[in-house]
Amino acid sequence: MTGEFELIRDYFADIGGDLSGSVQLSVGDDCAVITPPAHQDLVVSIDTMVEGVHFPFGTSGDRVASRLLGAALSDLAAMAASPAFFTLALTLPDTDPVWLKAFSTRLAELARQYGVQLVGGDTTRGPLTLSVQVHGWTPAGKALLRSGARPGDRIFVTGTLGDSRGGLETLLNNIHGEQVPYLQHRFFCPEPRLDTALLIAPFATAAIDISDGLLADLNHILEASQVGAMLNPGELPISHELHHWVGEAQSRQWALSGGEDFELCFTAPALVEPKLAWALRDHNVAVTCIGQISETRGIVLAEDGQVLPVTPQGYNHFSGTGNLR
């Protein structure tokens, strides 16, 4: 049976590269040694995923790696941070070499893609549980927060919403069809909007990544900023694949509260919309205006001349509802 130190040496000793030159000592010692760049703030976030809660039992190692690191880096995108390095804690039921090879190979590919280096972690035995702590840099005092939205600001989202919830549905019910590969890819392989975040940062007043659902996560911005929001559900960006599979009503519902799309929701003043559009002119990720910040607290949906208040529902790990989330 592979021991802890052999496992680290064989699968995790050389993942990613230090593009910033800040990592002085990496995997293999008691601690990593980091030299912060001048005039930069360090931003840190940690995510944990559990087999049977966040992904189905028996999921291949490469899919778990994609879901794990993509979701974690999305938190850095929400603050317009440039990724730097990460740590990894693994609880494994056994040291399955096939699973570990697939996991570590995909993790290394993503680390190179996003320019992050694995600098340490821990391993232990138990039910499959994975935790990643990501670290990134922002110019001093420039991190995007949740607390900056103001009445009159426009509300934007990146990409399309509801796809991950659709992918989850296909897994829970063993559904097959033309749209299934796309939807399951969106579930297993979130794409952190790191490049988009850097483009919107000069214009955005607040931001968050969509993990618990648009309504729930937007509400975090509203509470931190002490404002409200009016959304136009007709403007929600929904993929052709999701719409074709479940139709308009279900697509909208999942776009509003499905969660785990790991897209960005951000606000920006109306006056900067032309400059924002110009900054995004050659960008390959869609950015859609879906509403406006208001003075009146709460969230309302405005469509066809009606204004309806909604409850900001989203996923809650301790609510006793939901599967594989």
Image (cartoon, rainbow, N blue to C red):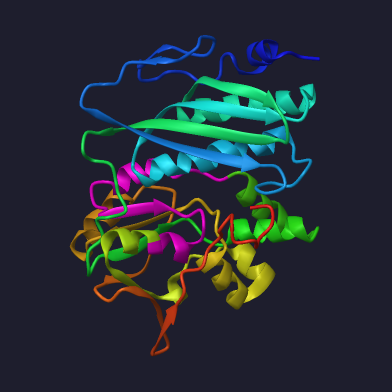
Q: Is residue 195 magenta?
A: yes
Identity of the residue drawn at 22% across and 64% down: 150
Q: Relative to 27, is 271 on the left or the right?
A: left
Identity of the residue drawn at 62% across and 34% down: 130
Splitting the image into 4 quarters, where does residue 194 fall? top left
Q: Relative to 26, is 246 on the left or the right?
A: right
Residue 25: where, in percent of width, then height? 43, 10
Residue 315: where, in percent of width, then height? 56, 60
Residue 154: where, in percent of width, then height? 29, 65
Splitting the image into 4 quarters, where does residue 60 fall? top right
Q: Can you say whether 200 is above or below 7 in the image? A: below
- Residue segment shown in magenta: 190-219
The quarter in which the N terminus is drawn is top right
User: How many marks overall?
Assistant: 0
Q: Relative to 58, is 310 on the left or the right?
A: left
Q: Can you say whether 275 is above or below 61 in the image? A: below
Q: Can you say whether 2 is above or below 89 in the image? A: above
Residue 110: where, in percent of width, then height? 55, 30
Identity of the residue drawn at 81% across and 58% down: 174
**Residue furthest bottom in the image:** 305
Residue 201 or residue 144, whichever sits in front:
144
Q: Can the viewer see residue 197?
A: yes
Q: Is residue 271 magenta?
A: no
Q: Can the viewer see residue 287?
A: no
Q: Relative to 240, is 231 on the left or the right?
A: left
Identity of the residue drawn at 47% across and 18% down: 17
